[in-house]
Image (spheres, rainbow, N blue to C red):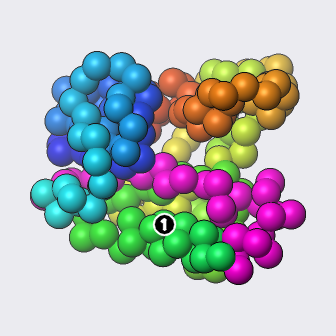
């Protein structure tokens, strides 16, 4: 299966699909953290290249409800509408199977409610981080390893220049479940 992992610099989801023998490519404006098939550039340069599936992780900075106190300014200067348009351009791509992941965000009211909300603790990680999935042509993810712990570690990270990068990474258990269940 030919799989595009849009807006992924980490290589985590890409490598989960590759490990199962799929032709997967990550794409992001940033270089990949882990060497492997990666297109550094605009996802819309390659979105029409005959993909069987796309898993997209559009930036949530201007969409996530955790930043609601900044919404008025983001609406006023167009940042929020730009983020909505980017999300929707991914959602309507001509690809048979699509999963778009984002935290709890305004897309639930702007577009539609997510098909599923998952947590890392459902896939072997003892943390909480509600992740919404909007699906096209894909089944709901089934939990693979429900664990205790349920700590909000990702939100307790102290300030640092790479905090945003650490918070946005997909947990390996979720990536492995995506690859195993969707491919």
What span is colored magenta in the figure?
50-76
Which image quarter is the C terminus in? top left
From the viewer's perspective, tell me whether residue 9 is left or right of residue 128. Answer: left
Residue 150, above or below 85:
above
Q: Quadrant of residue 171?
A: top right
The kind of secondary structure element at disc 1 is helix
Q: Quadrant of residue 38?
A: top left
From the viewer's perspective, tell me whether residue 39 is left or right of residue 127. Answer: left
Q: Nearer the viewer, residue 80 or 124?
A: 80
Q: Nearer the viewer, residue 10 or 149?
A: 10
Across and down, in percent, residue 28 comes to: 36, 44
Q: Residues within 10 Å of mark 1 (few under 14, many from 20)?
A: many
What's the residue at 55%, 41% (across, down)? 142
Q: Is residue 53 magenta?
A: yes
Q: Nearer the viewer, residue 81 or 156?
A: 81
Q: Identify residue for label 1.
A: 87
Q: Is residue 123 magenta?
A: no
What's the residue at 59%, 37% (across, down)? 168
Which image quarter is the N terminus in? top left
């Amino acid at each position: 299966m030919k799989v595009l992992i849009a807006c992924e610099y980490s290589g985590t989801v890409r490598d989960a699909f590759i490990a199962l023998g799929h032709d997967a490519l990550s794409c992001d404006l940033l270089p990949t953290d882990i060497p492997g098939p990666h297109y550094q550039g605009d996802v819309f340069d390659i979105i029409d290249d005959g993909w069987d599936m796309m898993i997209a992780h559009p930036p949530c900075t201007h969409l996530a409800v955790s930043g609601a106190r900044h919404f008025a300014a983001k609406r006023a200067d167009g940042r929020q509408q730009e983020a909505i348009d980017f999300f929707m351009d991914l959602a309507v791509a001509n690809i048979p199977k699509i999963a778009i992941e984002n935290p709890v965000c305004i897309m639930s009211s702007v577009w539609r409610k997510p098909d599923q909300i998952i947590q890392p603790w459902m896939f072997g990680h003892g943390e909480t981080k509600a992740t919404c999935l909007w699906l096209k042509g894909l089944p709901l993810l089934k939990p693979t390893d429900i664990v205790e712990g349920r700590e909000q570690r990702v939100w307790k990270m102290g300030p640092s220049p790479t905090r945003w990068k650490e918070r946005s990474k997909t947990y390996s258990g979720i990536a492995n479940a995506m690859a195993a269940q969707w491919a």
